[in-house]
Each structure stands twice: as structure tokens, then as C-alpha cells.
Amino acid sequence: MNYENMLSDRVKTIKPSGIRKFFDLASQMDDVISLGVGEPDFATPWAIREAAIYSIEKGKTFYTANQGLLELREEICDYYKRRFHVSYDANDHCILTVGGSEGIDIAIRSILNPGEEMIVLDPGYVAYTPGVELAGGIPVHLELRDEDEFKLTPELLKSVITPKTKAILLNYPSNPTGGFMTKEDYEKIVPIIKESGIIVLSDEIYAELSYEEEFCSIASFDEIKDQVIIISGFSKAFAMTGWRLGYVLANKTLTSAMKKIHQYIIMSAPTAAQYGALEGLRHCQDEVESMRDSYKTRRNFLVKAFNDMGLYTFKPQGAFYVFPCIRSTGLTSEEFCEKLLEDQKVACVPGTAFGAAGEGFIRVSYAYSLEELKVAVEKIKLFVEKYQK
Amino acid sequence: MEDKLLLKLLQKNARMKITDLAAALDESKDDVINRLTELEKQKVICGYHTIVNWDKTNTEIVTALIQINASPEREYGYDRIASHIYKFSEVDTMYLLSGSFEFVAIVKGKTMQEVAHFVASKLACVDGVTGTSTFFTLKQYKNNGVVLIEDEDGKNDRLVVTP
């Protein structure tokens, strides 16, 4: 029997992730030095792990409320107010999700009708486009420009909004570019968002990893706050990727809609993870800060190293990626990464894995120790010298 | 220049090269050198030491924590008594504490007898010291933020490439 025929048309149209190919190539080789990872190198702070273990010992092994533990939701709302100056109500505006990933999915599915358009930034995180397609929507790719440091400018935004536009998905600080939107940057686009009435999905998973500038949530603009769905979680800031815990924050109507999907497909986010996260929000801010300091020094190191070897790299203000331009080597992004892997056993991810606008760039993660980065950079330098024109 | 970042980098790796420090801090090499000299002068940086796990060497070394009771002195408080204690080379680390005793001193010697002798014949005899309790260490797990025993924790088994 041909099971291909059994598959839904929709799933068949979804393209496999461009990351997958590099994962397969790199995992077949021994002793690969990887700069291709999208998760922190730190283990989860012990206080968080200990709190989760204790919750299991105490028999807290049941489902929580669909939306998640009330005390955790209250803590999240306090945290967003304290850190980013946006107020939400724990009962009406917050749902704990299985990672930020579930948040992206339920947010998209809550608002899109078949055939409606959603603007997706390119380059952007790999899950956004398939998320829109799986919901029957039409992803409209908005190509960001390196000369803007991959920020969303009012001109670019205006150029893609049509009557069919239902929403836009933002992600700042950005994976893969490290691009960042300051308050002043947002001030320029907020009137357009307000006027068009579109929904903004703001993936703020890297908010805590902001370096020189203070992180600004687009939901902090009162005039469009109700148009915004914030998606965030504990993976990056608290080094909790494997725990799968995220959350969404939105107005009451949108939250109820997302809750409807969430309660049927998930029921509730993992209980032990919720107890761990509670401890994290209450007592681990110092560890978050300490990790942020480490990332910052690594970023500085990498930006200088790539610029010194002639690969122009802007200084990203957030997340843990740099996005060097490799055009001067005459190679495409894919060629560069494949040959680098073959030649020097260093794994980076081609910019094109994050969309067509990523051509000419590679994503380099600095979720590695300075010592590891130093070794990897030496190898990349040897490689680049061969191709540099 | 952010002193905190500079100090944290050095605390983690005191052998870090000036070039690498400058890159990690996004500063010039000269600025880093000048700042280091300044911090050394101000005794913010008190040295560039190595954390040694002596248990893994053939060197005999015994460590004891000594609780010390002492009476304060007019004009000097506890500081003069403290100086009479910490000047002994056997004393590795010493703190003034709140609570039911005044000082704790970490004392090192080659053997338990040597440490016991030091406590009985030197430390306990310092003017103002009214009592001591000695606790010999059996095993060192962590020192200055570094775990010194075999520990799988945090061993990185991340996938090679992830989104």
C-alpha cells in the first residue's frame, strides 16, 4: 500500500526543515565542532531542577488547570509588568503552553481563516511558515534587509499589508539574525499596526537576552496592546529547553480562543516543569543575568572575529546568534556551510534555512564557551582564507 | 568598560589573553591593560591564582575549619586580634562572623597533628582568643564555584544542529 497517498494534502505541501539536512550531515561525522545549536549551553539552574524534583516527591503529578497553575500565571504577569512594563491578568490573559512552539501554533490557529494572509519575517524562525500553512493560511514573506540590521521598518511593513492581511508574526530579538527592535523602532510602525487593525504575534522568547538596549515589547504600546499576542517561555532565558514550557499573553477574547484549542490538544502543560518555572521566576533572576553577561562577551568576541576575517557582521543587540555575511567568499550559504563542515568539521546553519532572504548569510550560535568559540573561529578563518577574494 | 564583565571573565579564566579579553569586552587592548593595572592598584584584583585539587596529587594536605571565640578590644574591636591570627601562614582564609562565635579560619597543614599543634600552641594562645573548635575536612566538593569531584551534571548532550 502506498501510504504517501494516505497523507493529507496539507501535510504534503509542508517543506522539510532546511535545518534537518545539516543535522543529518553533521551527525554522520565524528568530532564536529558545532556552532549550530539554538539552545543555551548552560544546564537549568539547580534551584529550578530541585523545585521540580520536590514537586514530584510531593506527588504533584496531576494535570494542572488548563491554563496552568494560577500562582505561576500570577508570577508571569508580575514578571512581565516588572521587567517589561506590560500588565496582564492571570485569569483572563495568560495560558501556559508546551514551549513557545505550542504558543505559536495556537495563536495562529485562533485567528486565521483559510486563505487569509499572515506576514512572516524573512529570515525568520523555521516554524512560522509551516505553522501558517498548517492552519490553512497564506504566509506572506517580508524580506528584511541587512542594511537595516534586519529590523522591521515602516516602509517594508506598508509594502506588504493588503486587505487580506490578518496578522503579522514578529520575533525580536531575532532567531536567526540577532536583529533587535528598540522602543524608537517600534514607535515608527505602531501607527501602521493601529490603522490596519491587524493582529501582531510577538515571539518574545529571547527578551531576557537583550544586551545594550532595554528590551521593548510591542504590547507596551497601549494603543495596540489588545491587538498583540505575546508568545514567550522559559527555554532561552532560564535554560529550560527540554522542559517544554512557554506561555501566551493576550486580550480576553483571544486568550479564550487559544484556550479552547489548548484544552483539547494539550490539556495542560507539564506539571513538574511549571513548579520548576515558578521557582525560576521567583528566585533565579541573578542566574539569568549571569548567563546574559556570558552571552554578551561571547557575542563581542564573535562579532570581532568575523569582521576581522573579512565577513561583515553587524553587532546584534539580542538573542545568541550572529549572522555574518559570507558573500565575499563567492559561495552560497549552503555551499559555505557544507564545505566548512567537510573541510574543518565546523557546523553552522545556512541563512537560507530561515528563508530566501537569508542567502549570503550564515547563522552562528554563541551558546558555547569562549574557549570553544575560539577553536571554532580559528578553523573558520582557515576555511575563509581559501575562498576570500 | 564594564568592570563586572572584565572581572567575571578573569575569575573564570585568569589566563585569558589580553587580545581575547579585549575582543570579549569590545574594547581596545590598551584600554584593557590600563584598566587591569588600575584594578590591581586599587586591590580590586588581588592576584591571579589557580584552583588546585590537591587531593589528586601526591601532596599531603589537611584542611580544617576552626571556629574561634574572642573578646573585642577597646579601640580595635576584633581587627587587631584577627590580624594576630591571619598573619600565621597556616591560615589560608579567615572571616569575622555574626552568631555564636567570632571568627572562622580555614587552616591548612601537612598532617592532622601539625594542624592540631598549630591550634593548641599558636592560635588558642593569641591574646583575646577565648576558645576554639576544630573541624577537619574529609572531602572537598566545590571550591570557588568549581566542582572538584567527578560530576556528570551539565554534561552537554545537545543535538549538533537545532533550529
Image (tube, rainbow, N blue to C red):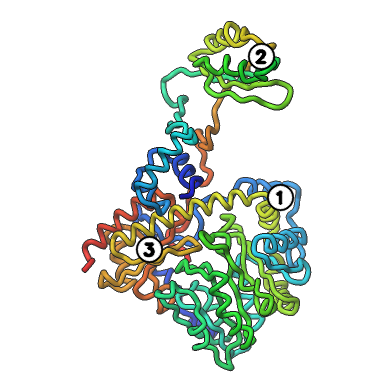
Residue type at mark 1?
Ile
Q: Name the residue tied to disc 3.
A: A348
Residue A63 visible in the current orientation = no
In this orientation, which residue lies closer to the viewer: A301 or A8? A301
Give residue A63's position: percent from left, percent from top: 74, 61
In this orientation, which residue lies closer to the viewer: A28 or A271? A271
Q: What residue lies at 59% left-to-right and 73% top-to-bottom?
A: A202
Mark 3 residue element:
loop
Q: Name the residue tied to disc 2.
A: B132
Residue type at mark 2?
Thr
Mark found first going from the N terminus, 1 or 3: 1
Q: Based on the displayed image, in which of its 4 quarters is residue A216 positioned?
A: bottom right
Q: What residue lies at 67% left-to-right and 53% top-to-bottom?
A: A276
Left or right of residue A149, residue A162 in this image: right
Residue B118 visible in the current orientation = yes
Give residue B59's position: percent from left, percent from top: 43, 19
Give residue B22's position: percent from left, percent from top: 38, 49
Q: Which of the numbered marks, if any, corresponds to residue A165?
A: none
In this orientation, which residue lies closer to the viewer: A97 or B4? B4
Mark 2 residue element:
strand
Q: CA distance from mark 1 to mark 3?
A: 38 Å
Q: CA distance from mark 1 to mark 2?
A: 43 Å
Q: Name the residue tied to disc 1.
A: A56
Q: Are marks 1 and 2 in contact (CB under 8 Å)?
A: no
Chain ID at mark 1: A
Q: What residue lies at 36% left-to-right and 75% top-to-bottom?
A: A359
Q: Quadrant of the C terminus of chain A?
A: bottom left
Q: CA distance from mark 3 to mark 2?
A: 60 Å
Q: Based on the displayed image, in which of its 4 quarters is residue B67 positioned?
A: top right
Q: Is residue A283 above or below residue A106?
A: above
Residue type at mark 3?
Cys
